[in-house]
Image (spheres, helix red, strand yellow):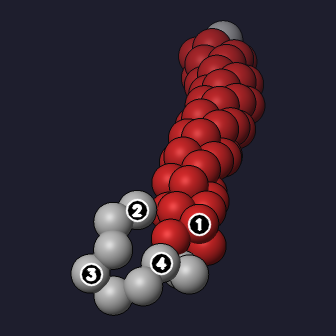
């Protein structure tokens, strides 16, 4: 009877390990999603700053030396 109990414990342990692997994969997917969203937000912010500065340079590009913009 003891070998059967050992077998059952081993199978339960393997099943729990598989469950943990699935949870780990889900955690990694969520982390990856957060990183992608953060990168998109940072990229949008950088794009807006560059666009604003480029517009200022274009607007003030024709001003003579010593002039104000």
Residue 53 image point, x, y percent: 50, 62
Residue 48 image point, x, y percent: 59, 50
Q: Which residue is mark 3?
A: 66
Report, in whole angstroms, how far the alpha carbon at label 2 lies from the one at label 3: 10 Å
Query: Of marks 4 and 2, which one's residue comes earlier in the chain?
Result: 4
Within 10 Å of disc 4 (Cα), the crowding (few <14, some 14-19, many 20+) is few
**Mark 2 vs 1: CB contact within 8 A:** yes
Label placed on residue 69? 2
Residue 25 image point, x, y percent: 69, 38
Q: Which residue is mark 4?
A: 63
Q: Which residue is mark 1?
A: 59
User: Who is closer to the viewer here, 44 or 66?
Assistant: 66
Question: Looking at the picture, does residue 50 appear above or below residue 42?
Answer: below
Residue 30 visible in the current orientation = yes
Report, in whole angstroms, how far the alpha carbon at label 4 lies from the one at label 3: 8 Å
Query: Of marks 3 and 1, which one's residue comes earlier in the chain?
Result: 1
**Mark 1 vs 4: CB contact within 8 A:** no
Quarter location, residue 9: top right
């Amino acid at each position: 009877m003891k070998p059967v109990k050992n077998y059952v414990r081993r199978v339960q342990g393997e099943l729990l390990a598989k469950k943990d692997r699935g949870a780990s994969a889900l955690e990694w997917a969520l982390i990856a999603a957060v990183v992608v969203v953060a990168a998109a937000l940072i990229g949008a912010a950088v794009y807006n700053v560059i666009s604003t500065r480029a517009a200022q340079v274009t607007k003030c590009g024709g001003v003579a030396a010593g002039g104000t913009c």
